Amino acid sequence: MNRGREPDSRTDMNRNEGSRLLLGVSASIAAYKAAEVTSQLTRAGVSVTVLMTPNATRFVGAATFQALSWNPVFVDQYGTGSTRPEHIELAEKAALFLIAPATANILGKLAAGIGDDMVTTTALAYPKPLWLAPAMNTQMWENPIVQENIARLARFGHELIQPDDGPLACGTVGPGRLAEPDDIVARVLEHLEKIRGDS
């Protein structure tokens, strides 16, 4: 059940038409929530292009995201032989780049400036602050190294969508659960509306 406003009304479709969002999906069981985020944003009129790490496709297939977004899904960082690198072109055109779920692995790579897949190379080419929605086991979330990486990313201006506290796929209960799709979508739509108001 949506806790915020319904994102798929005709008014929202008109308001968000033309908004381009990149959604990076990394290897986490929480990837199924990214599918719901994709569906809600697409219904709200946002053009969502999904980028996946190769391991993310073990949890949810690229075909699912393509069907929900009506756009191609990018997994191979070496692209299709285009004359211009796809990660550069995608990064330049997006109004917002959200990574959800953002694993400890992805956060560590970004904090260190490492780009070795389609998600991280595009993220490093993206000229604006990233939006990061972490998802991981509580012990991983509370690990001092992970927290240091998060703090470093925050110092560079990247936006963190705090994980929820609750039951996790590993059977434990605590912080590290990906924020609910309704909450992520509401924040994204609010931000896109603010961007349009400022332009």
Image (cartoon, grey):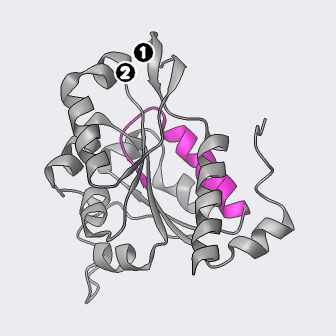
Q: Is the magenta region chiefly helix, strand or loop?
A: helix
Give the percent coordinates (x, y) of residue 158.
35, 53
Callout 2 touching callout 1 (CB < 8 Å):
yes
**Residue at 47% from the left image edge and 49% from the top image edge:** 61
Q: Amino acid at mark 1?
A: Cys
Residue 28 vertical position relative to residue 70 in the rendered view, above or below: above
Residue 142 vertical position relative to residue 72 in the rendered view, above or below: above
Q: Amino acid at mark 2?
A: Asn
Give the percent coordinates (x, y) of residue 169.
47, 19
Earlier-in-chain disc, 2 versus 1 = 2
**Residue at 26% from the left image edge and 86% from the top image edge:** 84
Is 194 on the left or on the right of 128, as rendered?
Answer: right
Residue bearing mark 1:
170
Specify the quadrant that holds the C terminus: bottom right
Q: Is residue 10 covered in magenta? A: no
Magenta-highlighted residues = 24-43
Is 133 on the left or on the right of 79, as rendered?
Answer: right
* Residue 70 appears anywhere in the view: no
Q: Which mark is residue 137?
A: 2
